Amino acid sequence: MTGVLLISDSAGDDPAGLGPCRIPVQTATAALFTFDQFCSAALVILDDRIYPTFVARRMPRREDLVIVNPHPDDATVWNRAVSLGATHVVATRDGSDWLHLKMHAATDFQYADWESLLGPGPDGPAQPVG
């Protein structure tokens, strides 16, 4: 499996509102991502705004599909998530910390900066050993 695939048609450096993250994310539009990219990604993040285009592509169900919802008050996202077999729905601003941890887990924590993920310990920042 490869890394994280973000499917979004939104322009800009952060199309799904993930915020800064050390994990490399491959971004593709709903019309241009490949079947192999979709199936081989360790985690797929789908921008809810492209749901109709995504459904038209008729991708198979898969584990580790997360829908990012830019409109947290939109309860209809749950129907779309169930229809796709998504494992989670995340509001872009409220769920970015959880999503970052999910991305780290999907990539076997290869890019984890534990200090920033867990915060300083009770005795302050961790000190190098040795």
Image (cartoon, rainbow, N blue to C red):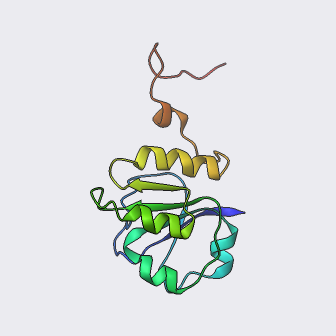
- 73 relative to 33, above or below: above
Quadrant assignment, res 4: bottom right
Q: Who's the residue at 48% across and 50% down the image?
A: 99
Residue closer to the observer: 97 or 75:
75
Q: Position of residue 108 (x, y in %)?
A: 68, 47
Q: Position of residue 64 (x, y in %)?
A: 61, 58
Q: Who's the residue at 49% across and 36% down the image?
A: 117
Most distant residue in the right direction: 1
Most distant residue in the top direction: 123
Q: How many marks?
A: 0
Residue closer to the observer: 1 or 50:
50
Residue closer to the observer: 64 or 23:
64
Q: Is residue 124 left or right of residue 33?
A: left
Q: Who's the residue at 38% across and 54% down the image?
A: 19
Q: Position of residue 94 (x, y in %)?
A: 34, 47
Quadrant assignment, res 44: bottom right
Q: Who's the residue at 62% across and 82% down the image?
A: 34
Image quadrant containing the C terminus: top right
Residue closer to the observer: 35 or 2:
35
Image quadrant containing the N terminus: bottom right
